Image (tube, helix red, strand yellow):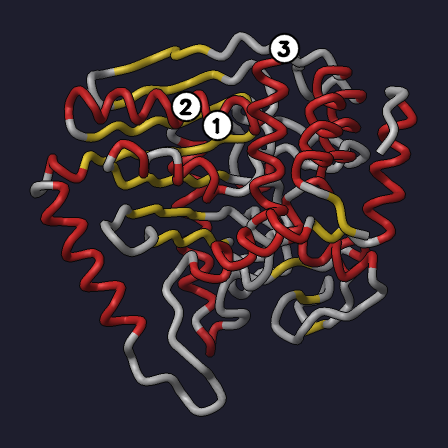
Amino acid sequence: MHFSYDHLYHFTHTVFTKMGCPDSQAATAAKALLSADVRGIDSHGVARLTGYVRLWEAKRVNATPDIRIVHETPSTAVVDGDAGLGLVVAPFAMQVAIEKAKTVGTGWVSVRNTNHFGIAGYHALMALQHDMIGMAMTNASALVAPTFSVEKMLGTNPIAVAIPAGQQPPFVADFATTTAANGKLELLQRKNADTPLGWVQDKDGNPSTDANILKKQGALLPLGSDREHGSHKGYALGSIVDIFSAVLSGASYGPWAPPFPAYVPMPENMPGKGLGHFFGAMRVDAFRPADEFKQHMDNWIQRFRSATPAEGHDKVLIPGDPEREMESIRMTEGIPLVDSVVKELREVGAKFAITL
């Protein structure tokens, strides 16, 4: 089934207000969540709405958080999210980074005591309208086995970087530090489909294609899949995100990061508060004139687009191209939702007397 953006936005906004979120925060959360659907990242959009409601029901999400800066310097800050929706806490923290960059050239903000923040790219993109480079990352519940490990120690820990251009669209890289995000496994589970080889391993560390393997003590794999294909690099990237987001801010890290599914028990002896995020904003003109930089970004993008494509491919893409194309299509033709997601949304709506 296909739904218009406006229809899903109204439904999602209403669900968040029924949870008790102030209207402005509900609007922020709905916009952040739906940015994933319009960009084709279905694993992180309204398919996750049920999960947020369950976290709220389990009293693990504060619908009316007192989000505040607890430590800062002219260029840095630590934000405490007061267990609020990451969809609300993250834009607040990114705005802090932007305001600091306006003053001193760059802004860096680490966040603790928060929850799942949707797609990292949404927050990084906030910097572009200010002629700034934006960065966003977050740690997540431990579903990933480090290279040579059978124990799950890291989350999918995404990284996003958004860089402005002039006449060309911006460069936007947004990727998990695993071979695939957990949400993609959830989508395959709804379709009763297998994963490609290299996404997951079983509880003994053997390769698997079972989309339900996490329920059987298996694990996701770092970017690269195995040592011979560079999984140690994906492991290192995920570790950097965990340290910047959680160790630096005072959030829980590694295997202690709180899980997104509300039915999964919280880890024992957690060393910090909630999940952690990390944001950066860099004023381009802190390095060189913004117009000059954007002219050269246009040149960079055009040259990469003109690279000779390999056989069987029409063109070479730059990061952000597939999402922009998908957004253009879905804002016109609607957002497709699989039947199981529609069923879940209708069940959520029924809880709050809302019709999808």
Query: Residue at position x 75%, y 29% from top?
Result: 11
* Figure quadrant of the C terminus: top right
| Mark 3 or mark 2, whichever is nearer to me | 3
Asked whether disc 2 touches disc 1, contact meaning CB atoms under 8 Å apart, the reply is yes
Label 2: which secondary element: helix
Using the image, tell me which numbered label, if any, was put on residue 93.
2
Compared to 286, does 158 lie above or below? below
Number of marks in the rendered image? 3
Left or right: 109, with 285 as reference point: right
Q: State which tag comes first along the sequence, 1 or 3.
A: 3
Circle 3: is it few (<14), some (14-19), or many (20+) Cα within 10 Å?
some
Left or right: 26, with 292 as reference point: right
Query: Residue at position x 62%, y 38% from top?
Result: 34
Query: Residue at position x 75%, y 37% from top?
Result: 261
Q: CA distance from mark 1 to mark 3?
A: 16 Å
Please name whichever residue, 30 or 326, is drawn nearer the observer in this view of the structure. Answer: 326
Question: In the image as oriented, which residue stretches furthest toward the front?
Answer: 332
Q: Which residue is mark 1?
A: 90
Using the image, tell me which numbered label, if any, was put on residue 296.
none
Please name whichever residue, 333 or 247, is drawn nearer the observer in this view of the structure. Answer: 333
Asked whether disc 3 touches disc 2, contact meaning CB atoms under 8 Å apart, the reply is no
State the image coordinates of residue 39 (x, y, percent, origin top left): 55, 50
Amino acid, disc 1: Ala
Amino acid, disc 3: Pro
State the image coordinates of residue 278 (x, y, percent, origin top left): 40, 33
